[in-house]
Amino acid sequence: MMTKKPYLLHIFMFFALFSLSSTNYAWNHKTIYSFDKTLFVGSIVFPQTIKLIPEVSIYRGGVKIKTDTDHTSKKTQFTISDDKSCTTFYILVTQNIQPCVQDNTVKYLQVAPNERYKLYTLEKIKTKDSHEWRISLEENRKKNRVIPDDTLIVIFNSDYVEKLARGNELELPRIIIQKNILDLVGGTEEKLHETEAELILSSLDHKLIHPKLTSQVKQDYKKKIVVVMSNP
């Protein structure tokens, strides 16, 4: 009976060392991955005169972005993750997008014909002390309405957007809504919510026409059972 204990000790030691090594490798792998990414915070700012701000649908890379609505601060906030090396972002505000399909394949997305839009190009510029955003605007072009890859698509009436306000290294420029938005929608907050509810219903189809997001390949490190035997 005593001769079997060394076998069990060897097996136990192997699993302990292997498990520790695997855990450290996995932890380091995750840490490296997070170091390569930056989390950016974005927001849509409504006027303080609105009691309850409407829900807004936002898409990027083929998926709907989760948003948090704060009726006290009158903000809709969201986060996106991107490579640290990425210095250019696009924000599109429009009510309708459509796919360009060739051979049953979605080649790209575009703003629907005759649909009003605002397309902002954001360039992150390094300054002496921090970073700032250089913002350029394109709107309502008749031709070449192709939406750049990884554009942040905000399903909203572009006429209701006043401007993009300054951001910082980790905060995208804020989308500022017109102070007279209630006048623009017909005079009441109820009308604003009805309009946005219709957009949300119509935007359900956008999930189907977005190009599928390329899935990230993650290696699955499986543990192998190895029995170490020694001569008695």
Image (cartoon, rainbow, N blue to C red):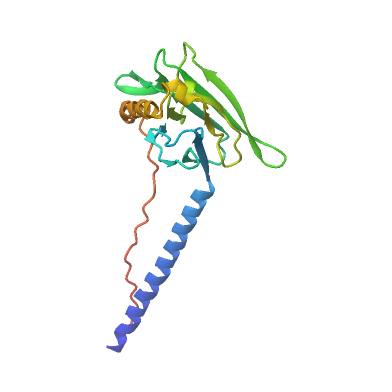
Image height of 170 relative to 2, above or below: above
Which residue of the protein is positioned furthest toward the right in this rendering? 128
Residue 76 x/y as whole percent: 46, 38
Q: Residue at x 33, y 19 (%)?
A: 101
Q: Which residue is drawn at 57% across and 39% down?
A: 85
Q: How many callouts does the rendering have?
A: 0
Image height of 169 relative to 165, above or below: below
Residue 189 x/y as whole percent: 41, 29
Q: Is residue 98 visible?
A: yes
Front one among 30 and 19: 30
Residue 60 x/y as whole percent: 43, 33
Q: Residue at x 47, y 20 (%)?
A: 117
Which residue of the protein is positioned furthest toward the top in this rendering? 142
Q: Residue at x 40, y 13 (%)?
A: 113
Q: Quadrant of residue 167?
A: top right
Q: In which quarter of the image is residue 84?
A: top right
Lateral position of residue 177 relative to residue 231, left or right: right
Q: Can residue 147 be seen in this view?
A: no
Q: In which quarter of the image is the C terminus?
A: bottom left
